[in-house]
Amino acid sequence: MTEGWRPTQGSPQASRAQIGLACLGWLVGLLLCFLLASSLSPHGGQGIAGAYVLMQDRWLLVMALGVTLLSALTALLARSRFRPRGMAFSPRAVIALTLLAMVAAVVGRHWLLLDYDLSRDEQMATFDAWIYAHGHLAWPLPPEWRVDFPMLNTLFMLPVGRPVAWISAYLPGHTGLRALIGLIAPNWLGGPAFTGPLMLGASLWLLWSIARTMLTREGASVALLMLLLSGQSLFASMSAFAMPAHLAVNLLWLRLFLANRPRTDVAALAVGFFGTGLHQPLFHPMFVAPWLALLLVRGEWRRLGLYVVVYGAIGLFWLAWPHVTHSLIWGPGSFESDVGTSYLSRLLDLLAQNEHNLSMMSANLLRFTLWNHLALIPLAALGAGLALRDGRVGALLAGLLLPVIVMGIILPYQGYGFGYRYMHGLLGNAALLAGFGWQRLTPWHTRLRPALAVASLGTLALMVAQGTLTHRLYATFSHENDAINASGADYTIIGGNDGAFALDLILNRPDLSNRPLRLSIWEIDDADALAARLCRGGGKSIALPQDSFFAQEDALFGRPASGEANQRFAETAEAFKGAGCGVKVLK
């Protein structure tokens, strides 16, 4: 390492006023975020953001406030004989804890998430990985489904009318990784689903490795504790979300970057190419940008020039990727949709749809706080106080704040997620800042260690509650999904407003081999003509839901039945019966 990158041997101590301000700011900010987030409607256009506040976060907030009070009392009343002398993980302990976290993620995928992909993001990750695992970049569509392509649910697909093939609009890095791991990992580990636990384990070990170059052993142990007891990190690793891969890739990049050698810079740039193409092209560059700014401040011109030039090429490559996949799905009868393929057109469309930005971002930050270690934000705030003294701390802080600002402007709505998933790739930044914050508390360590232990146990209790809430959410949709599959029908028609979030039940395999094939009523213009086509030749059946089928889903979100499934049932059933299909009832 060069002189400017050596580990910190000591940190300016935090004053009592600074400690009080960090804790008070955390508490006031948490309550303010809750008040602003509570203005979101749980049933309106704000989607799941408002529902999460009502369904999950208000209960977690009550628990968090109780744990905070207990931790504060512990710090005030701690006596010398109850004060632990130190807290430092050994390398063996780190390995054991990492393996334990990975096991929890593998087991949780099966027992808590029921091996189900709830959100459209998760479904698209599984969808694309299946295509890549079969050696394709896009899967051909049968000619009879090209005109009726929108019925299959094209949300997050490349926006092309009458395509000859289909693929999601996401970049291929994460799904390609899932496809690769699916070919290697045995079924008892989950096959492609083992990607999340593997990324979690890599993130924990990389964070420890980085922290040991920046912090004392106890500071590094606190940083690791922040990620170990992160519900956001654990539960996301059970899912098919791309965010655990973002975190692992960012930490690997940082470990290579901090080594400050020509060969590690080359390796970091290779990791950067993969990281930029993981999911969306914005997240990894936002993580990297503050570190390149630090090179600028330090006058490391040659190294800065290398990174700027290569990242410019990386950006151009991935920005062009949608045009590559666009050419694979475009056919003689294809046409452009209202939203273009390019990232610029999609960005303009997002900006046009944005509303309630402040309330949405408040809901996101509320979830970020409640789904991570309860000491993370106060300790990170204390660590951030070193930003003007230590460029590394400044880069960590800037990387943490940049997504809040950028995503608050262009896309404040995150949809489904554990915590705030658009900041997931920066959990390492927050944990390292917390490690710096703990080092600033050295004079008070003997008094604060019991309080940190209480906060950690309380956070663990919160994670149990999060697991219960998560299971309830996933189980509701998983059971509906199982009931649809068990109907034995060839087709089913579902309306996006039949249940609280019924659109997420309209998912089909790339080769359309699933039965029943699931169709969106929103995209059916002529039910009689569709029935004539689908029922041709006889022997086919269709499953039609009634309002009662979505009762558990509506109850979960506190929403009354929409009545739409019942309203169209008779007319739709008559159309398909008249065309020769049998009708099965989902209720």
Image: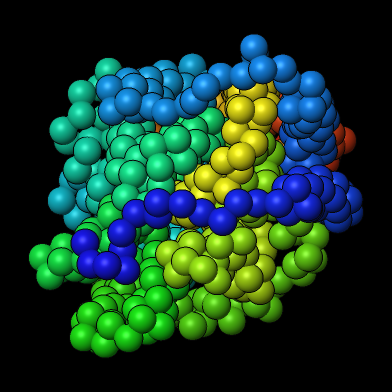
The spot of residue 221 in percent (x, y) is 44, 34
Q: Is residue 475 above or below residue 404?
A: above
Is 421 left, or right, of 56 in this rendering? left
The spot of residue 30 in percent (x, y) is 79, 47
Q: Residue at x 23, y 35 (%)?
A: 182
Q: Residue at x 67, y 46 (%)?
A: 378
Q: Is residue 22 above or below residue 463?
A: below
Q: Is residue 443 above or below residue 95?
A: below
The spot of residue 307 in percent (x, y) is 26, 78
Q: Residue at x 15, y 51 (%)?
A: 135
Choose between 374 and 279: the one closer to the eye: 374
The colour style of the image is rainbow
Image quarter (top left, top right, bottom left or bottom right) of the N terminus: bottom left
Choose between 418 and 10: the one closer to the eye: 10
Choose between 452 and 84: the one closer to the eye: 84
Is 454 left, or right, of 254 in this rendering? right
Q: Is residue 130 visible?
A: no
**Image quadrant assignment for residue 350:** bottom right
Residue, far left: 263
Image quarter (top left, top right, bottom left or bottom right) of the C terminus: top right
Q: Is residue 296 visible?
A: yes
Q: Count the numbered circles shown.
A: 0
Q: Is residue 404 above or below residue 306?
A: above
Q: Residue at x 33, y 34 (%)?
A: 201
**Image quadrant assignment for residue 63:** top right
Is 227 left, or right, of 199 in this rendering? right
